[in-house]
Image (cartoon, rainbow, N blue to C red):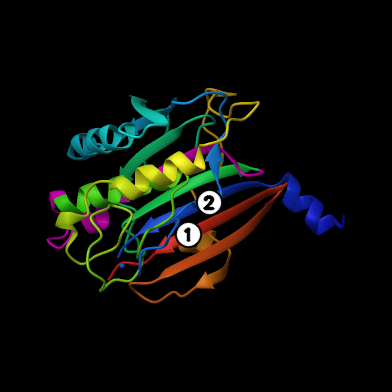
Amino acid sequence: MNSSMRLRGLIAVAAVAVVMIPSAAAATHSWGGYHWARTANPFTLKLGDNVSSAWDSYLGTTSADWTASNVLDTTIVAGVTNPRQCRATSGRVEVCNANYGNNGWLGVAQISISGSHITRGTVKVNDTYFATATYNTPAWRNLVMCQEVGHTLGLDHQDTVFGNPNLGTCMDYTSSPTDNEHPNAHDYEELDTIYAHLDSVTTLTATSSASAGGGFGAPSEWGRRVAGSDDPHSVAVYTRDLGVGELLVTFVIWAG
């Protein structure tokens, strides 16, 4: 095994998915096989509440939506990070909002991976855009919050073509999100598939109370683009080697 392959085997991956806007539904939409290691189903994933009152109800709706899965529950707990930095904490997902700037994205989901196991995650929603008339609606807030948390569970998008008809899922992109605010049956079926096996270890236990890693919210921090494009209404994937066996992977959907 060469050094490159050995590094990939040891890698802890931070993967970021960013919302903006819609492709044809895939037969499967697991995100690279990434999943939380656990020894039993259903398991409980903690969502750290680092959001303002303007977002609390949407985080609550999203938590309830994903808890409807057969294989997992989510529970909202007190956040432990500065929302602007939104640093990850092992064993859970920190959810944050702030004015992150005119950087092209509505929301970012970031996960760290050891092998294929998710060890920590973050979700960021960008108030710079949600303060505008276009995006300051319940439908857009529900779609983005639901989708970004869905990525931290190991789900990819069902559809990334902006102009396709709505699929009735938050894992879809659209210019009119009213019908795409919550998961659909296919999302729950995919979670059943992703979590069909059990692991001998768990990554759901915090190894430290302190948050870890950078925020990685700026496109300049994402590294090299390896797939997709930087055009509006498109998907792009970036990777950045952080050293010490860690790779940052950023999955972006650009806003209009």
| Position of the N terminus by quadrant | bottom right
For the residue pair 236 and 197, the one nearer the viewer reads as 197
Residue 130 location, x and y as percent? 21, 54
Q: Amino acid at mark 1?
A: Phe
Q: Quadrant of residue 162?
A: bottom left
Residue 53 location, x and y as percent? 19, 34
| Position of the C terminus by quadrant | bottom left
**Tag 2 residue:** 15
Q: Quadrant of residue 23?
A: bottom left
Q: Quadrant of residue 180?
A: bottom left
Is residue 134 rendered magenta in the image? yes
Task: Decide which of tag 1 and tag 2 comes sooner along the chain.
Answer: 2
Q: Residue at x 35, y 61 (%)?
A: 105
Residue 193 location, x and y as percent? 48, 43
Side of 24 where 58 appears, left or right: left
Helix, strand or loop for disc 1: strand
Q: Which residues fall within the magenta stretch?
A: 115-138
